[in-house]
Amino acid sequence: MEKIIDENKQGESLALEQKENNKRKLFIESYGCAMNFSDSEIVASIMADQGFNTTQNLEDADLVLVNTCSIRDKAEQTVRKRLEKYNAVKREHNPKMKVGVLGCMAERLKTKFLEEEKIVDLVVGPDAYKDLPNLLAEVDEGRDAINVILSKEETYGDVSPVRLNTNGVTAFVSITRGCDNMCTFCVVPFTRGRERSRDPQSILEEVNNLWNRGFKEITLLGQNVDSYLWYGGGLKKDFDKASEIQKASAVSFSNLLDLCAKTQPKMRIRFSTSNPQDLTLDVIETMAKHTNICNHIHLPVQSGSDRILKEMNRLHTRKAYFDLIDNIRRIIPNCAISQDMIVGFPTETEEDFQDTISLMNYVKYNFGYMFTYSERPGTMAERKMKDDVPEEIKKRRLQDIVDLQREHSEIRTKEHLHTIVEVLIEKESKKSNSQWSGRTSQNIVAVFPKEHYKIGDFVNVEITDCTSATLIGEAIAYSENN
């Protein structure tokens, strides 16, 4: 299951780079996971070469694209409302505007959008963004256009993304695409295809380029970053067929982390999302070896019940998860751990739910992303299982774990009281224009008076107070990473 960043409108995209000679305007919005936001930056780059600059003004747009998420029904409903808005603007202000759907919904609802509902002009799946110029030419000639073919090779490693909605400090770097895990609740394998990894050299080139442009932190992205495996190209599942030379020179995720950390030793490195079955000890040991790899692991567990985990086709057990947590705590004692959790999965009993509660009490996560089960068409759970947990029970269980997570978040945040933490300044605090806001290595937000510091600075901050989710303190000096 992908981590949901925000299902609400993320703000119209404004690229850091605008090409002076480009005359047409692109309005692009993204919903769902970090990978969708990263993909939108790839799309903006491809369209920039076709004469499009991004715009914040919907009414000015010649082309409107929405990058979509199918992981929950609410996400799809949000996108549908946005499509209604686009078409209203098209009718009232700009009849020549073209509207397109990208991403996971594009692959899943292609026929509905184009033929039945006729609410878009083009539909483009996650592996077909390089075909956008051809598809747009079809649309300009008055024809609907569609390409949702999944690829076994495409990684967009040769596309330099245009950074959208950027603070100039943090950036996403996509390293893998697709997923082979086939969790019964998840649409990702059907909408994004099989796992394949990007050439490590292209990743390092992107990291170097970001550092040279002033970026201070990157997040290595994949549906399952721990599955990263480069052996010269091809799907991960075909690695056994590779030559002995390819196997000997293969680059694993721990190898890639090590390369990135050494290549830019002053750049912070994060990664997301991990899968418990694939997070190996060598990854944790590589994290411990480099001070610039952030001490935070997002480790979705989904349920604390072995029975439900089996129904979900999660390939870890409760005990294996505890062993992994114990190893993380042993090797990186100050590592923050966050979670994804689903309640109300088909057949979940109160006993199963209490297993989830006890697991949360054992780990005491720093923060988490919690949801009620949402049946997704085409998944194994939708085809084979009855959605039989009443909605009121789902809501009660969700509230229970949200409340418990809030308690645990407060415990974890208070651990930083009266300590000194390194904060990377990202923006002005939402609550006060006299304070900066940034994040620690553990991905905890910290705020402190601005003084003479600026966005992009690494600052040592003495923590004097906190809320359940935010550290409050005073800057005492620049960090040595500046």
Image: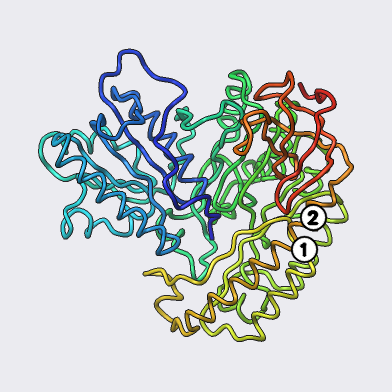
Q: Is residue 244 above or below residue 71?
A: above
In the rendered image, the quadrant that contains the C terminus is top right
Image location (x, y in percent) of residue 130:
34, 36
Query: Contact, CB < 8 Å: mark 2 with mark 1?
Result: yes
Residue 443 relative to residue 192: left or right: right
Residue 392 relative to residue 246: left or right: left
The image quarter containing residue 405 is: bottom right
Give the residue displayed 38% in from the left and 41% down from the top: 29
Q: How many marks?
A: 2
Q: Is residue 395 above or below residue 408?
A: below
Image location (x, y in percent) of residue 63:
25, 34
Residue that mark 1 sits on: 364
| Residue type (three-letter) at the residue carrying disc 1 | Lys
Circle 1 SS class: loop
Image location (x, y in percent) of residue 345:
53, 77
Q: Is residue 225 above or below residue 429?
A: below
Give the residue displayed 50% in from the left and 83% down from the top: 389
Which of these two is toward me, 9 or 46? Answer: 9
Residue that mark 2 sits on: 412
